[in-house]
Image: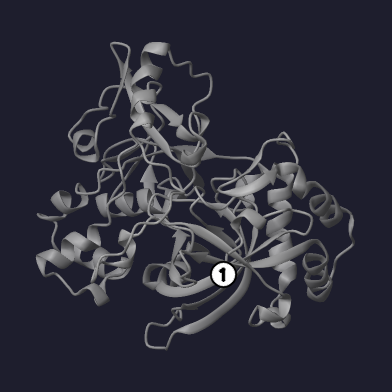
Amino acid sequence: MSSFLPRGCSIAWAVLLPILLFLAACAPILEPEPEKAPGAPVSSLIDRLHLRPSGYDDLPGWNTDYQGNALRAFLRSCDKMLRHKLGSAIGGVIPGTKGAWRNACEAAGSRDIHHHGDARLFFEDWFRPYAVLNNGREKGLFTGYFEPEISGSMEPGNGYNIPLYGRPADLVTVSLGRFRESLAGERIAGRVVDGVLTPYPSRAEIDNGALRGRELELVWVDSAVDAFFLHIQGSGRVRLNTGESKRIGYAGSNGHPYFAIGRSLVRRGAFSQEEVSMQSIRAWLESNPAAAPEVMRKNNSYIFFRWLGGKNAELGPEGAQGVPLLAGRSLAVDRRFLPLGTPIWLEALTPHVDPAEPDQVLRRLLISQDTGGAIRGPVRGDVFWGTGRNAGEVAGRMKHQGRYWLLLPRDLDVSVLVH
């Protein structure tokens, strides 16, 4: 789910010219919303973030959460944010600079907080809650993701013949927000051919050998379906046939848009829209090995990986903010709208780990620490549930409505977004 810019990458003016022409044709994200045609779907409206000032009494379940766990995740974000230039923009459409977080982060690091009640008071002291709305609508879609575990080998053969690739040296990622403020959070990727930035090979082209012979293989796995879902999750653990287990993380994307193959399977009549889940999609792919490659290649987005090591790798997979994710406390958001590192109070339905049990109400403080190609809109989130089978059971079936509140520094002026 994470996103990184290439290091040491220089783009010539000949490359920038087509990018700037592309930008000139792009409509800004925050525009007056068009009239909604009778019967038109809500998604046809331009997404627009509004804030509504709230109090902690407005946050259902606030006094019963274990905010100390959220504070642990917040401190990981603070460690990253305090290393940034404090005069740089907060991110998303939230006005102000990263310096607004300094006092809260320093207070969190200096306080001797041992109890959830003390952590709750910390957030109440330093932050004010705002309900988030999209064109006046407070409800949005919330899904889940997890860290899968797959089998692999450092050498091909003996059933291990599906490569996971490292980031190619010629992959160029462009942050469009650097050229137009209204495109903050948007990125395109490609490679330079004859001085022009062109699209990178698609999933189908890569599967058919577009990168073969470039020594980009990090590891080989024994299941194309497992590899596909690892691409969707963005990180995971590889259990090597030597007995060693290594964490692998996101290193880049080919820049093609993400496509949810569940839609294709619904059109095929494989199952109904209501039956779509990670589990149902996986079961169909594994039961239809002849048709599975064609279906998976409808998602042209392709992820490149890197090995994760060091102390942070022991804490969890790395999110887009560059910090280890914390199970049940890290949230992926659309960074076009929301800044990473923000405390967010979420109320949403979630599946029970036992599919036979009814859904549960989740009311919990999380920290925005990740993003993803399918996470689009001001009221949209993806909850990180952890590693392994139980986490996958919940994440794979989560596609529920919910709402959330941002907790923003008290001295931050966000009146321009209040309606």
- Residue 347 lies in what quarter of the image? bottom right
Along the viewing direction, whichever of 32 and 209 lies nearer the viewer: 32
- Residue 208 lies in what quarter of the image? top left
> Compared with residue 298, is residue 70 higher up or lower down, i.e. above or below?
below
Q: Residue at x 70, y 42 (%)?
A: 97
71 left or right, relative to 189: right
Q: How is the image coloured?
A: one colour
Q: Residue at x 82, y 57 (%)?
A: 108
Q: Which residue is mark 1?
A: 404
- Residue 64 lies in what quarter of the image? bottom right
Q: Position of residue 373 (x, y in %)?
A: 39, 49
Along the viewing direction, whichever of 33 and 388 lies nearer the viewer: 33
Mark 1 Cα shell of 10 Å, populated few (<14), some (14-19), many (≥20): many
What is the tally of numbered marks visible in this picture? 1
Along the viewing direction, whichever of 91 and 113 lies nearer the viewer: 91
Q: Residue at x 43, y 29 (%)?
A: 173
Please indicate, yes or no, whether residue 285 appears anywhere in the rendered image. Answer: no
- Residue with the most extreme bottom position: 357
> Compared with residue 319, is residue 197 higher up or lower down, i.e. above or below?
above
Q: Position of residue 255 (x, y in %)?
A: 34, 36
Please indicate, yes or no, whether residue 219 appears anywhere in the rendered image. Answer: yes
Q: Secondary structure at mark 1?
A: strand
153 left or right, relative to 30: left
The C terminus - image quarter: bottom right
Q: Residue at x 63, y 82 (%)?
A: 60
Q: Position of residue 192 (x, y in %)?
A: 33, 18
Q: Position of residue 336 (x, y in %)?
A: 49, 47
The amino acid sitting under disc 1 is Tyr
